[in-house]
Image: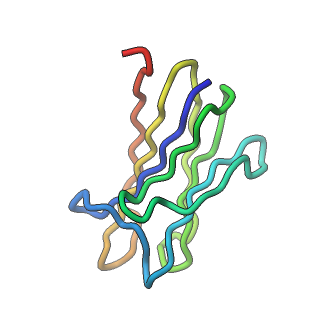
């Protein structure tokens, strides 16, 4: 089993926990269906999806005040891996700047 961590940051790498008082939603899709969904943590602006079966997923950051309101990143989850999917936004413009995917081996 492996994990996906979705992280929301602004251009200065500061956590974006909510917009207009509403938390950002993180979710993972598998085979076109929502596998799991949760609000990002209100302290660190992250959502951790634990012990997922291996395979292909779509990691999503979602909030109606962001542009785009639903940003997606396809990822492949391998054995003993933590995939960090980081969504980076311009906070003032609420515009997606880029998505970074980093793989961390859980054995090290």
Q: Which residue is most to the left? A: 12
Residue at 46 percent of width and 59 percent of height: 41
Residue at position x 64%, y 48% from top? 28
Picture coordinates of residue 18, whole percent (x, y): 43, 73
Name the foreground residue: 20 vs 67.
Answer: 20
- In the drawing, does residue 81 fall left or right of residue 13? right
Query: In the current view of this chain or complex, which residue is farthest to the top?
Result: 107
Between residue 105 and residue 89, name the one nearer to us. 105
Q: Count all numbered tags in the image, as a single digit.
A: 0
Q: Is residue 34 left or right of residue 71?
A: right
Q: Residue furthest bottom?
A: 20
Vertical comparison of 104 with 98: above or below: above
Q: Give coordinates of residue 53: x percent, y percent.
A: 69, 28
In which quadrant of the rendered view does residue 21 lie?
A: bottom left
Vertical placement of residue 38 versus 107, above or below = below
Q: Quadrant of the C terminus?
A: top left
Which residue occupies 43% across, 78% down?
19
Given residues 16 and 41, the one toward you in this image is 41
Query: Residue at 40% across / 27% down in the picture?
Result: 104
Visual colour scheme: rainbow
Residue 96 location in percent, x, y? 41, 64
Q: Is residue 33 left or right of residue 101?
A: right
Q: Nearer the viewer, residue 50 or 93?
A: 50
Q: Quadrant of the N terminus?
A: top right
């Amino acid at each position: 089993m492996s994990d996906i961590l979705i992280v929301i940051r602004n251009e200065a790498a500061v956590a974006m926990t909510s917009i207009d008082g509403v938390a950002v939603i993180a979710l993972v899709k598998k085979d076109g269906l929502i596998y799991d969904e949760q609000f990002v943590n209100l302290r660190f602006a992250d959502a951790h999806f634990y012990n997922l079966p291996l395979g292909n997923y779509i990691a999503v950051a979602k909030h109606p005040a962001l542009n785009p309101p639903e940003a997606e990143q396809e990822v492949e989850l391998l054995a003993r891996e933590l995939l960090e999917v980081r969504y980076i936004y311009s906070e003032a413009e609420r515009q997606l700047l880029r998505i970074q995917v980093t793989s961390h081996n859980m054995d090290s």
